[in-house]
Amino acid sequence: MATEVQSSLQKLSNAKEVLNSNHNAISNTTTGNGVTDNEMNDWKSQLKLPPKDRRKKTTDVTATKGNDFEEFCLKRELLMGIFEKGWEKPSPIQEASIPIALLGRDVLARAKNGTGKTGAYVIPVLQRVDPTENHIQALIIVPTRELALQTSQICIELAKYMNARVMVTTGGTNLKDDIMRIYENVHIIIATPGRILDLMEKKVAKMDKCKMLVLDEADKLLSQDFKGMLDTVISFLPKDRQILLYSATFPLTVENFMKKHLHEPYELNLMEELTLKGVTQYYAFVQERQKVHCLNTLFSKLQINQSIIFCNSTQRVELLAKKIAELGYSCYYIHAKMSQPHHLFTRGIDIQAVNVVINFDFPKMAETYLHRIGRSGRFGHLGIAINLITYDDRFTLHRIESELGTEIKPIPKVIDKSLYVPEFQIEENENENNSKK
């Protein structure tokens, strides 16, 4: 596999050398606007870069071979969007899958949430889309509205200097509005399965020229919740489509789907362990009636940027949100049964800023646990996950720990701030740098 990635990079590099040699041959020419090529080369200095992220990062995102985004031979407009997003270098999953995807091959990748997975497929999608062709060229399917909104936001930001038109469509939004937007011509659609299938069956979303299909969190998309919808979706696509499939876990449903629909996929596995390296996990044994009091104690003792608290039912989410508000904390809640305007209202959550995840109710499944704690420690940053465990949860705790091959420790009286507070991580790095001088 490593050889094949290097080979793909070499092909891209060779193409780049040809372009560079052609460029050198006309280096003293000027454009019709009187701008020299040397001045055009100065495009990087014109970028509006965000402040450099100086937080400590784990090997989930730093264990790379040292490639740069420019080595992938990407369009300059796309590179401009990447750098202005604050992405300095590709993460391991991006470095491994982008060159393969750019060659048009099917990809099956196992990678953790929060390691740059979205960029790993959005970058090749934007690179391969031709904005001069007015039809749907790429379809990205995700299991939830929230993920669809997050993904579309990243896609729009990366496409800032391109003419690629991006649209997001999910259940709970106005179908008529979505139909009107598709008729205005879009290049990339990001959708949940039910809604895009509805638009396909109504012959509104025409997929006969859609050459790229991305399936993110495929383990969820192939669960019983979606009852074979992906098979139907694929029946609307051309035979020579490319499929990029990303999944944190690899159940039998994913394997069967791969054998049925993917053509000699390039397989990537960046999952030595299932949980993010930057997330320290703790549990606290509590009685059910003590949970809110325990939560209040955590709020007063922890230095929280933003926190996400998970419950096991929509009713408990609403009740807990009310309790937290009564304690005097700013709190928004979200669950699957809410209308779209309420969902949009919660976009104030900055996933990168979340440094504490709390399982107010402990989940029953290892998969659910994995997706929840992955909301902390995004893109290699550090964070903590705290689980409130009742007597009835004790066996589930041990089972999930065993299934994920991870350690969930008893919560200490004082949690080291360098494990989850960005300011302490920056200071630590500065101290290290100062000591080397």
Image (tube, rainbow, N blue to C red):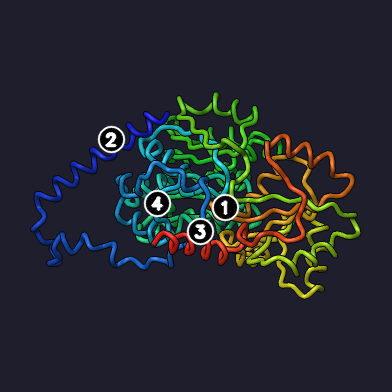
SS state under label 3: helix
The residue where tag 2 is placed is 11
Going by the numbered disc 1, the residue's amino acid type is Ala
Residue ID at (28%, 35%): 11
Spot occupied by residue 429 in the image (x, y as percentages of width and height)? 49, 60
Dot 1 or dot 4, earlier in sequence = 4
How many numbered marks, from 0 up? 4
SS state under label 4: loop
Q: CA distance from mark 4 to mark 3?
A: 20 Å
Mark 2 residue crowding within 10 angstroms, few (<14) / some (14–19) / many (20+)? some
Q: Is residue 121 visible?
A: no
Q: Is residue 29 visible?
A: yes
Residue ID at (64%, 52%): 171
Q: CA distance from mark 2 to mark 3?
A: 31 Å
Mark 3 residue crowding within 10 angstroms, few (<14) / some (14–19) / many (20+)? some
Q: CA distance from mark 2 to mark 1?
A: 33 Å
Of the 4 image quadrants, the one containing the C terminus is: bottom left
The residue where tag 1 is placed is 148
Q: Nearer the viewer, residue 418 or 331?
A: 418
Going by the numbered disc 2, the residue's amino acid type is Lys
Dot 1 or dot 3, earlier in sequence = 1
